[in-house]
Amino acid sequence: MKHLKQFEEKPTKLFGKLFWNMLFCIAPFVLFGSFFVLFGAVPFTFNDKQYYGILGFSMTLVLIPWIALCFAIVFWIYYSVGNYFLRLFNRIF
């Protein structure tokens, strides 16, 4: 189990790295889809209300950081729990 010891150390500023990586990973896809909303091909639905045009486009742009934040939180918790069990496993063996 010596080779697992190298993965015990948590990277510095992990949450920030996760957030910025998620932001730049999600942004192109959301921007591509938001152009369909801008030109009225697809509605942006929020609380069972459909938005088109500039309002729908701006609402999709506002959602980009929120989606990235939610994914970063979930992955940070997932990594932290996994790292905790990895350290616990390495101490036992």
Image (cartoon, grey):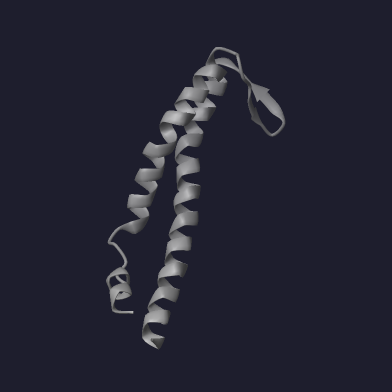
Q: Is residue 11 left or right of residue 81?
A: left
Residue sitting at 47 percent across and 23 percent down?
32
Does residue 42 sit above or below 72 in this rendering? Answer: above
Residue most extreme to the right: 48
Residue sitting at 65 percent across and 28 percent down?
45
Residue sitting at 47 percent across and 36 percent down?
64
In the image, 1 versus 25, the foreground residue is: 1
Q: Is residue 63 left or right of residue 90?
A: right
Q: For residue 55, what is the image quadrant?
A: top right
Q: Position of residue 41 (x, y in %)?
A: 60, 14
Q: Position of residue 24 (x, y in %)?
A: 37, 37
Q: Position of residue 29 (x, y in %)?
A: 46, 30
Q: For residue 3, what is the image quadrant?
A: bottom left
In the image, 19 versus 54, the foreground residue is: 19
Q: For residue 43, what is the image quadrant?
A: top right
Does residue 49 sit above or below 64 in this rendering? Answer: above
Q: How many marks?
A: 0
In the image, 68 versus 88, the foreground residue is: 88
Position of the N terminus by quadrant? bottom left
Residue sitting at 43 percent across and 62 percent down?
79
